[in-house]
Amino acid sequence: MRTNGDENEPRREQAAMGAGTVKRIGVIGVGEIARAIVTGLCEGAVAPPEVFLSPRGARTAAQLSARYEGVRVCGGNQEVVDRSDVVVIAVRGQDRHQALSGLRVDGGKLVVSVMAGVGADDLRQALGTDAPVVRAIPLPAVRERRSVTVTCPSHPVVDSLFERLGGALPVADEAAFNVFSALTGTLTAHYAYLATLASWAAGHGVAADQADAYVRGLFEGVGRSLSDGTRSLDQLAADHETPGGSNERIRTTWFGPAGSASLATALDGLLADLQRP
Ligand SMILES: NC(=O)C1=CN([C@@H]2O[C@H](COP(=O)(O)OP(=O)(O)OC[C@H]3O[C@@H](n4cnc5c(N)ncnc54)[C@H](OP(=O)(O)O)[C@@H]3O)[C@@H](O)[C@H]2O)C=CC1
C-alpha cells in the first residue's frame, strides 16, 4: 500500500502512461462510483483500457463514452460481460438480483464487486460462476487517482488495477474487509461535522462564506498533517493541543469517553450489518 500525498506523483504519472495489465474492463451499474473509476482510469491516460458500460445509468454512461474514446455503452449487461476480461459490479446491493440474474460469466473472467455489504459467496452464487470474485472499496477520490482501495482477496490483476487509481490495500479475509468497509461509513459524518462548525460560527454573526472558508482551511491543514506517517494519530492530536487549552477543552468535554463509546457503538452496529449473510 502507498499513502496519499505528493510522493505519489510518480505513480500518477505511471498511471497516466497506462501501466498495468487489464485491457478490457466492463462495468455493470454506471452510477457515481463507476464514474469515478472510469474517470480515474481514462482521464489523461496515454493507453487507457477499453471500457464497456452497462446501458444503466444511461446518463452517466453517455457522458463517459462521449468524453473518452475507448469507452462504449453496451446493449445489455451480458454484452458487458462478454466483451470484458474484468467485470466490475457497481450496482446498489438491493439491485444486484435484477442486474445479475441470468448472466453467464465463465471461469476465465474476473469479477470485481464494489457493492458494500454483499459477500463474495453471495455474489458467486447469484452469478452461478466459478470465476474469481474480488471485493473492493473504491472511494470517490479514485477519480483523481488519489485514494487507496481495500481489496479482498488479494489478486494481482485487481491490485494492479487499483494501484493505477491511487493504491491497493489487499486484506487477508472478509472479516478485515468489513472493518475497513465500516470505516468508510464515517466520511459524510466528517463533512457534517465541518458543516456544523461553519454553521455555528455563522449563527454567532460571522459571515457565512468566511466561516465556511475558514473551516475548510483549518481542516485542509489537518488533512495535510495526516500524511506525516512518522507521528501516530494520538501524537498528532497531542501536538495540536496545549495542556489546559481550547482543543483539550473541546476534546474532553464534547468527545470524551462517552463520545468515543457512542461512535464505537454505531460502528459495531454497522459492522454487524455488513457481516450479515
Ligand atoms: N458512492 C460511493 O462512494 C461508493 C459506492 N460503493 C458501492 O457501489 C455501488 C453503487 O453505488 P453508487 O455508484 O453510489 O450508486 P448509484 O445509484 O450512483 O449507481 C448505481 C447504478 O446502478 C444502476 N443500475 C441499477 N439497476 C441496474 C441494472 N439492472 N443493470 C445495470 N445497472 C443498474 C443504476 O442505474 P439507473 O440510474 O438507471 O437506475 C445506477 O446508475 C453500491 O453497491 C455501493 O455500496 C462502494 C464504494 C463507494
Image (spheres, rainbow, N blue to C red):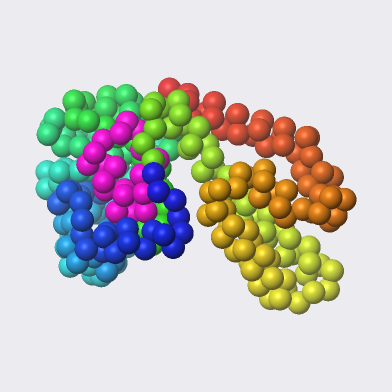
Rendering quarter of residue 186? top right
Residue 175 lies, with reference to residue 86, above or below; the image says: above
Whole-percent x, y for residue 10 in the image: 32, 61
As for residue 164 lying within the magenta part, the answer is yes
- In the displayed image of the protein, which residue is found farthest to the right? 244
Determine the residue positioned at 60% across, 34% down.
Answer: 267
Residue 258 in percent (x, y) is at 78, 35
Quadrant in which the N terminus is drawn: top left
Q: Nearer the viewer, residue 258 or 3?
A: 3
Q: Camera-side residue: 107 or 233?
A: 233
Q: Position of residue 127 (x, y in %)?
A: 23, 30
User: Is residue 57 something that shows in the picture?
Assistant: no
Residue drawn at 17 percent across, 62 percent down: 47
- Image coordinates of residue 133 in percent, x first then y, are 26, 32
Quarter of the picture holding the C terminus: top left
The answer to which of 120 and 8 lies nearer the viewer is 8
Rendering quarter of residue 53: bottom left
Residue 136: within the magenta? no
In the rendered view, does 212 fall on the left or right side of 49? Answer: right
Q: Quadrant of residue 74?
A: bottom left
Residue at image point 78% right, 70% down:
202
Q: Which residues are magenta?
A: 150-168
Q: Is residue 257 visible?
A: yes
Along the line of sight, the residue nearer the viewer: 257 or 7: 7
Q: Count every numbered label the image shows and give the total.
A: 0
Q: Is residue 195 left or right of residue 181?
A: right
In the image, residue 110 above or below residue 67: above
User: Which residue sits at x=22%, y=41%?
Assistant: 157
Residue reaching furthest to the front: 230
